[in-house]
């Protein structure tokens, strides 16, 4: 959470910082600020609310400066007021900080004993005081950093500048991301490449505990003990135009419509085209180990966890592997008993979610191998996992995850099919059929996206409903959870997702004529391969969901069924019906996700919320 930016070069930093902050706003947006060094003095400007409010304060200001830092905040310690907004300044020191200094109270008590006066409620302010004291004792900025780092607990990144060395900025990353962008005679520091990629594609990723000293003409890296380290510059493939809205009203809508391409890019390179079977190259060195595993523990948060829940159905049915799915925040503290002969699968779009990273750590502590499904290259999760499979979704900027989710499902499908074949659960013939089905998926996704106009009309009818209930069974149950989450996140409507069979155990009490009930009721195309495992293609679940729909109907709920085209049963029994293209059991959850996203988007639009930056949320949650 929180976005950090820094610039040290030859241009006026004001515009660069504000533009960078707008691009980082998805990380937090309750207050913002910048600090600029002019004639050796640091000038700080802060504001409550969005970057636009800060920008309006700075409209008439012209600076003679070439160095500055900025911050957009998602409050953890202290209310989102101007006073608690970053940058924080003490004496000649100014800092911006992301993450949490867990032992800040200890530091604060000690500093107060030395007569330091605290003026904010943040944990970050201790950093500014610690640097100020170190500088007073004669340390350079770098020496002070080396001295202070071992005294800090928690996960954090920060950038510090000083009036004593007005041509330098120092960045530190420790469990929270920080990247350096480098160009001729100018260098940038940022929480995420999105803030700077349109300025330079030459990026250095700071490793945990690393210190970056950024001067105008160069960057030096040091270990936390101050020992020089090698600078490795990477050229990033994501292009700046992928970060723009390209004519769409919101990033979320753009990202929904990018899904067929994102899925095709995720599939690409993972199929052995000679035999026509899924073959993920990253698994090549691990096949013997994977063949014999007894369990998969999936750890993820939010939407990524919902992908993990679908993954459980895939792994159990395709590969016959017992699978658990945990919230990162639960897994990390419940002392999970991990089987030696298992692996932990961590799923994360950003690869920076603190609770998911804690799952990785726990797994490593128990010597259990880790496999990550991740979208952001070089993220902490990608760097630290034993195997990384990338969803090639491209940058996802809307806070509500869409294309990252469907590409995660795509990878999980591929992983499960490959494991199933390795373990002899799936025959070669069936693996070929599942591969052919998958290759057809982008077309099915494009056809599903054509249903948007119908969903827009349904959204108009649903926009004022006080309560939404989503239900599905089997691998559609996680999609019910995801549909409800999407709606909650961006429209602020109360929504619940449930397994349809559980309806009678409580939630049915909520159903009356005001309830909007979304029923996931696809019919699965049966496999063509003879002797494919019997559970596939049978429509027992479909019949059960139909009974659940009747229970809702009898109590007056307004039903939208999301089913398969040409389904006369569900369309007759429901007030509204959305018919998806025919697809197999495993692909249907990917297709049903799309109407869930579009319905949430259009309801939110009608309710007038800030779709890309919903209140209180942030895209990348790097704190506990
Ligand atoms: C936040 C976002 C969600 C996301 C979750 C996990 O809560 O708002 O959209 O699903 O984090 O993020 P990750 O980057 O780990 O997938």
Image (spheres, rainbow, N blue to C red):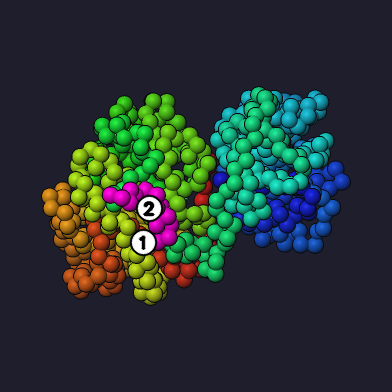
Query: From the viewer's perspective, is residue 224 above or below residue 473?
Result: above
Left or right, 327 with reference to 103: left
Q: Position of residue 335 (x, y in %)?
A: 37, 28
Relative placement, left or right, of 60 versus 266 is: right
Report the residue at 20% width, 50% height from top.
430
Q: Is residue 486 above or below residue 156?
A: below
Find out whether residue 130 is within the magenta segment: no
Q: Is residue 456 above or below residue 328?
A: below
Q: Position of residue 253 (x, y in %)?
A: 47, 65
Give the residue at x 87% y 46%. Answer: 39
- Give the magenta-colored segment's residue range: 260-275
Residue reaching furthest to the front: 274
Q: Which residue is mark 2?
A: 267
Residue 361 is situated, as x and y percent measured from the top left of the image, at: 45, 31
Residue 504, numbered circle: none
Q: Which residue is mark 1?
A: 442
């Amino acid at each position: 959470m929180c976005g950090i930016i820094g610039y040290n070069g030859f241009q006026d930093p004001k515009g660069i910082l504000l533009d960078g902050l707008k691009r980082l706003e998805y990380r937090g947006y309750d207050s913002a600020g910048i600090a600029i060094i002019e004639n050796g003095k640091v000038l700080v400007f802060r504001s409550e609310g969005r970057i636009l409010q800060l920008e309006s304060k700075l409209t008439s200001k012209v600076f003679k400066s070439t160095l500055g830092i900025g911050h957009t905040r998602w409050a953890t310690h202290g209310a989102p007021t101007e006073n608690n907004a970053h940058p924080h300044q003490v004496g000649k020191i100014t800092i911006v900080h992301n993450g949490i200094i867990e032992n800040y109270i200890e530091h604060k008590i000690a500093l107060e004993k030395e007569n330091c006066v605290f003026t904010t409620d943040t944990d970050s302010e201790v950093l500014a005081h610690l640097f100020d004291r170190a500088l007073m004792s004669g340390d350079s900025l770098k020496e002070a950093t080396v001295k202070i780092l071992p005294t800090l607990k928690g996960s954090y990144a920060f950038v510090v500048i000083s009036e004593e060395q007005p041509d330098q900025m120092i960045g530190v990353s420790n469990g929270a991301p920080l990247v350096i962008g480098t160009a001729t005679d100018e260098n940038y520091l940022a929480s995420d490449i999105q803030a700077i990629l349109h300025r330079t594609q030459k990026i250095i990723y700071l490793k945990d505990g690393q210190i970056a000293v950024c001067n105008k003409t160069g960057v030096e890296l040091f270990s936390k003990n101050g020992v020089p380290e090698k600078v490795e510059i990477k050229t990033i493939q994501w292009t700046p135009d992928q970060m723009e809205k390209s004519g769409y009203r919101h990033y979320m809508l753009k990202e929904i419509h990018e899904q067929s391409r994102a899925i095709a890019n995720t599939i690409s390179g993972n199929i052995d085209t000679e035999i026509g079977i899924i073959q993920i190259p990253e698994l090549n060195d691990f096949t013997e180990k994977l063949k014999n595993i007894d369990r998969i523990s999936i750890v993820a948060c939010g939407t990524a966890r919902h992908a993990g829940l679908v993954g459980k159905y895939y792994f159990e049915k395709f590969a016959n592997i017992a699978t658990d799915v945990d919230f990162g925040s639960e897994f990390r503290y419940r002392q999970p008993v991990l089987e030696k002969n298992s692996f932990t699968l961590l799923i994360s779009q950003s690869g920076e979610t603190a609770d998911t990273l804690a799952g990785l750590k726990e797994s490593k502590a128990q010597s259990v191998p880790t496999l990550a499904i991740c979208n952001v290259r070089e993220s902490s999760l990608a760097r630290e996992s034993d195997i990384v499979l990338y969803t090639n979704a491209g940058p996802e900027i809307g806070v509500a995850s869409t294309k990252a989710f469907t590409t995660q499902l795509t990878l999980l499908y591929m992983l499960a099919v490959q494991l199933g074949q390795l373990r002899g659960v799936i025959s070669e013939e069936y693996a070929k059929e599942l591969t052919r089905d998958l290759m057809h998926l982008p077309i099915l996704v494009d056809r599903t996206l054509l249903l948007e106009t119908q969903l827009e009309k349904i959204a108009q009818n649903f926009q004022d409903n006080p309560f939404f209930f989503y239900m599905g069974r089997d691998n559609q149950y996680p999609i019910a959870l995801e549909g409800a989450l999407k709606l909650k996140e961006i429209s602020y409507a109360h929504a619940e997702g449930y397994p349809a069979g559980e309806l009678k155990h409580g939630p049915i009490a909520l159903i009356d004529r005001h309830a909007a009930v979304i029923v996931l009721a696809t019919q699965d195309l049966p496999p063509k391969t003879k002797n494919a495992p019997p559970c596939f293609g049978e429509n027992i679940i479909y019949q059960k969901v139909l009974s659940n729909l009747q229970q809702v109907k009898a109590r007056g709920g307004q039903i939208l069924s999301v089913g398969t085209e040409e389904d006369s049963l569900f369309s007759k029994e429901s007030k509204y019906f959305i018919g998806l293209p025919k697809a197999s059991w495993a692909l249907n959850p990917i297709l049903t996700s799309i109407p869930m996203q579009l319905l949430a988007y259009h309801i939110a639009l009608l309710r007038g919320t800030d779709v890309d930056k919903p209140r209180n949320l942030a895209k990348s949650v790097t704190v506990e």
